[in-house]
Each structure stands twice: as C-alpha cells, then as structure tokens.
Image (cartoon, helix red, strand yellow):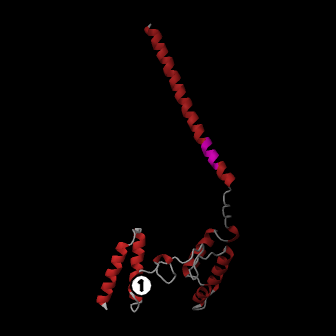
Amino acid sequence: MRAELEAVYAEAEAAEAEAPSLPSWFETERSVRRVWRVGRDADQDPVTLTMNDVSSGSPERPGGKGKEESGPREGQATRRTFTDAYKLRIVGEYDALTEPGARGALLRREGLYDTHIGKWRRARERGALGATAAPRPVKASPESAENRRLKAENARLAAELARTKAVLEVVGKVHDLLEGLSERAD
C-alpha cells in the first residue's frame, strides 16, 4: 500500500509540475486538501482526489468556501447583547438567591457565567445601568462630521494667520532697522 501511495504522489507531483503556474496560496491549499482526503479516505484513489476540481470549495473539504454568505454561518456562535433591564433583573435575582446551588441553576438556565454577574454588578454600582445610566451617544450625522472638519480647518487657518502676522511684524521691524542704519551710513 505504501509503495502504491508513493507512486501516486510521484504521478501527482509530475502532473502538478506540468500544470500552469498557480499562486502559492492555491498550491498550499491543494496540498493540504490532498493530504487530508488521502488520510481520511485511504480506500479511494488518491490521484482522483488530488486532481479533483480543488477550487470548487465543497463544504465537506477543509478550507472550502462553499457559497458566499454575508452573516454568520449556520451553527456558528454569535455575540449576545443584553439590555440594561435584563442585566439589572438577573443581578437582582442572583443576589436574592440564598439556597445552595440556586445561583448556579440561574446561571445555567440563562446561559451566563459568574463573570457576567460580576461585571454587571460593578456597572450597576458605577451607575452605568438603569435609569441613572448616561444616555449612549447618538451616531454622528454627516453634517456634524462636516462641521467638525470645517471647525478644525478654521482653527488651522487662524493659527497660520497669526504666524504670518507675527512674521510680517518682525520683517517690518527689520526693514525699519536696516533703513535707519543705511541713513546713518550715508
């Protein structure tokens, strides 16, 4: 079997050498797929597996792209977000529980960790949760971004004008000094 595999690899490498030049990332991906498939399906012909259309990206192959997707893939975890009211309710429930194992049961039921409770408790003590929380900043509109840009440009130009006035004042004084010196020399 080993001799057959070595012969197959030699044939595959010879065929790849004759193939047109491909980008290096493609060669790496092809090699990884070939080794994975040969190790997984040793009873199948490795040459056929190697020379398959490796760019098809079928989902069962490692590194396969499959169809283009904009959101998370099926079965992929997504980040959860919690409202302030939910956080306050859970922290209140957690603090009220006194029976052994009740706090752990609450965390398991809600799918939370004790670090969530600690962070939410500290946020509550800082006043970052609930009615005392400061309102979240509103996303800036394009007009306000333009206003900020114009104000920055105005400040830059005002500073440049002040420097120019200072330079002109110095040049005027130097001119007067040189004029006075030239009159004395005459």
In the structure shown, which secondary structural element does the residue marked by tag 1 occupy? helix
Judging depth in this view, the residue of 90 and 64 nearest the camera is 64
Q: What residue span does the magenta drawing correspond to?
A: 148-154
Residue at image point 48% right, 75% down: 55
Task: Determine which residue is flagged by label 1.
Answer: 48
Is residue 176 in the magenta section? no
Image quadrant in which you'd find residue 102:
bottom right
**124 on left or right of 172:** right
Q: Quadrant of the C terminus?
A: top left
**20 on left or right of 93:** left
Image quadrant in which you'd find residue 73:
bottom right
**Label 1 amino acid?**
Thr
Judging depth in this view, the residue of 120 and 139 nearest the camera is 139
Does 56 sit above or below residue 137? Answer: below
Where residue 65 sits: x, y (%)? Answer: 52, 76
Judging depth in this view, the residue of 155 and 18 nearest the camera is 18
Identify the main secondary structure in magenta: helix
Residue at image point 57% right, 38% down: 159
Q: Residue furthest right?
A: 131
Is residue 150 in the magenta section? yes
Q: Residue furthest top?
A: 186
